[in-house]
């Protein structure tokens, strides 16, 4: 779709052409118009066309319009209007630049549209990020179902709080599968592992939907958790490697938005569990049917260019010793400690919130869905958008420290509160948690070189899952000691506060640096 703008400039046509070529970077085309890339549109296929319509009394009538050939899979219905608005603003900015240059005035500042990347994405990079984000959305939907339906599942199988805690912790043992799968991404490539693990998620949830008993269900969820973790880890690696410098945090934010949408779908389907004692199986079956999307994902997903270049240059990939050498060993220790400490609280907080609301505040599944939608839906979206901007403009480290401390304190207040406090603290906590999560995710992918990025992410996943299992077991075994599940979960909140103030300040800052600068290859 073309965006056309008509302006009149106080200059003769030849002068307008000269300044347009100099300022806007346009060149003569076959139809005597001037064409070139449209700066500020956020994607590389956007073009600017400047046409001289006529002149009189020393003034020139000019038409500026834009067009784009980008076809974004899966999210075109969301980003199509956003990019269209961005092109319109970019054309207006081009006109303002042309006026300012002719008048000898300073160049005006471009007002960027929300959700438009700060730097330009190539069409190939945009398609890859969109495809990976779609995979992440479906995967996170499948992975969120156990936590959201935990109360219905345990009731159906007659399990206790302690058995639920053990099941949730055991499902984390699937990290061993995730470890292998994520590490293989360094040897076999990002694309192959992403597609294989996505298929594994769907198949494991099909078994969960049909499970005759709690033990088989737990075993299936062990595999679901393993494949979900591996998929999301490799997805983050892929978007960071493909995103242009200056937009890596933006790419991670878009991935987080997609994953959050998947989580929201899991919450939206929660009322299905109120239909009957076995109706929770419907949501698991829906996630299993997502396997039909695999061929389409395979068509759109290609290997990242950074990994392709590495695989051509050397076969020395995924070497464990490089991860623990002088250059990267200290980084890994710090990021691993942060992952363990933050997950010690985030896992019981995320997985046991519904149980807490049901047992201690009398919420039904429908009420929980409403609560989650109001306090986590739109606020979470805002948090991710804010995180993407602040991580690029202010840096990952200060954002991570402040956001992790704030989100932990607010979430602790949530588990110790009641009434309106639940709604206020949950809303504020999700905004801060989105900022903290993006900063920590950026550290985990940006601080290690391409040849060991999958291996490092796999081992960091082990650290995080170890913290998750510890937190789940601690919270579900302390509830009878401290007088309630909420208090037990709140105690776990001390761990991420330690990470915020004693671990994160020692990490290097990746913002405003290329991947090759922050994590140079050693092969």
Image (tube, rainbow, N blue to C red):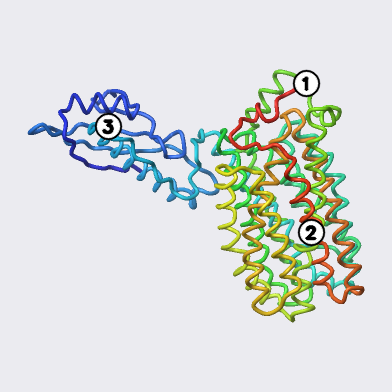
Residue 278 position in % (x across, y down): 78, 72
> Which residue is pictured at 64% across the width and 73% down the height?
423
Q: Total of numbered circles in the picture?
A: 3
Quadrant of residue 210 within the rendered picture: bottom right
C-beta proximity under 8 Å, tags 2 and 1: no
Dot 2, crowdedness within 10 Å: few (<14), some or many (≥20)?
A: many
Of tags 1 and 3, the one toward the viewer is 3
Could you say which is closer to the camera, residue 438 or residue 331? Answer: 331
| Residue 3 visible here | yes
Which sits earlier in the primary sequence, circle 2 or circle 3? 3
Dot 1: element: loop
> Which residue is pictured at 72% across the width and 63% down the height?
409
Residue 42 position in % (x across, y down): 46, 39
Which sits earlier in the primary sequence, circle 1 or circle 3? 3
| Location of the N terminus (image quadrant) | top left
Of tags 2 and 3, the one toward the viewer is 3
Residue 279, placed above or below residue 322: below
Residue 47 position in % (x across, y down): 37, 34
Dot 3: element: helix
Quadrant of residue 193 within the rendered picture: top right
Residue to which mark 3 is pinned: 101
Residue to which mark 2 is pinned: 347
For marks 2 and 3, give the CA distance. 56 Å
Residue to which mark 1 is pinned: 315
| Location of the C terminus (image quadrant) | top right
| Residue 130 visible here | no
């Amino acid at each position: 779709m073309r965006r056309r703008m008509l302006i009149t400039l106080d200059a003769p046509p030849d002068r307008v052409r000269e300044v347009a070529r100099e300022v806007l970077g346009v060149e003569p085309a076959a139809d005597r118009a001037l064409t070139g890339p449209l700066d500020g549109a956020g994607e590389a296929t956007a073009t600017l066309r400047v046409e001289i319509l006529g002149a009189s009394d020393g003034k020139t009538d000019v038409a500026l319009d834009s067009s784009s050939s980008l076809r974004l899979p899966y999210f075109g219905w969301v980003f199509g209007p956003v990019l269209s608005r961005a092109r319109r603003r970019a054309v207006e900015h081009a006109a303002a630049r042309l006026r300012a240059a002719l008048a000898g005035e300073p160049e005006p500042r471009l007002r960027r549209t929300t959700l438009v990347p700060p730097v330009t994405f190539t069409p190939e990079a945009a398609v890859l990020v969109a495809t990976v984000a779609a995979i992440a959305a479906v995967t996170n939907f499948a992975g969120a179902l156990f936590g959201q339906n935990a109360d219905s599942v345990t009731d159906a199988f007659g399990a206790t709080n302690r058995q639920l805690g053990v099941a949730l912790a055991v499902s984390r043992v699937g990290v061993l599968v995730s470890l292998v799968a994520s590490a293989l991404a360094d040897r076999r490539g990002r694309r192959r592992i992403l597609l294989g693990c996505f298929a594994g998620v769907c198949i494991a949830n099909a078994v969960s939907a049909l499970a005759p008993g709690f033990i088989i269900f737990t075993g299936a969820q062990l595999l679901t958790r393993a494949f979900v973790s591996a998929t999301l880890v490799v997805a983050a690696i892929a978007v960071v490697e493909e995103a242009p410098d200056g937009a890596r945090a933006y790419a991670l934010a878009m991935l987080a938005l997609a994953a959050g949408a998947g989580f929201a779908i899991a919450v939206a389907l929660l009322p299905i569990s109120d239909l009957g004692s076995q109706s929770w199986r419907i949501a698991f079956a829906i996630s299993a049917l997502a396997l039909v999307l695999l061929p389409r994902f395979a068509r759109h997903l290609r290997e990242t260019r950074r990994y392709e270049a590495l695989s051509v240059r050397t076969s020395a990939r995924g070497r464990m010793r490089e991860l623990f050498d002088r250059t990267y060993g200290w980084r890994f220790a710090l990021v691993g400690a942060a992952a363990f400490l933050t997950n010690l609280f985030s896992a019981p907080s995320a997985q046991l919130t519904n149980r807490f609301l049901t047992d201690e505040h009398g919420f039904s599944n429908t009420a929980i869905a409403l609560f989650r939608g109001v306090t986590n839906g739109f606020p979470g979206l805002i948090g991710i958008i804010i995180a993407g901007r602040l991580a690029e403009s202010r840096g990952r480290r200060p954002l991570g420290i402040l956001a992790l401390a704030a989100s932990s304190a607010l979430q602790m207040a949530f588990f110790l509160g009641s009434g309106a406090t639940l709604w206020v603290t949950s809303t504020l906590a999700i905004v801060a948690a989105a900022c903290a999560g993006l900063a920590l995710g950026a550290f985990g992918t940006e601080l290690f070189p391409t040849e060991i990025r999958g291996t490092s992410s796999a081992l960091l996943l082990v650290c995080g899952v170890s913290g998750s299992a510890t937190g789940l077991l601690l919270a579900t075994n302390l509830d009878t000691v401290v007088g309630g599940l909420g208090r037990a979960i709140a105690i776990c909140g001390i761990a991420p506060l330690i990470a915020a103030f004693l671990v994160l300040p020692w990490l290097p800052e990746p913002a405003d640096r290329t991947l090759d600068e922050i994590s140079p290859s050693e092969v």
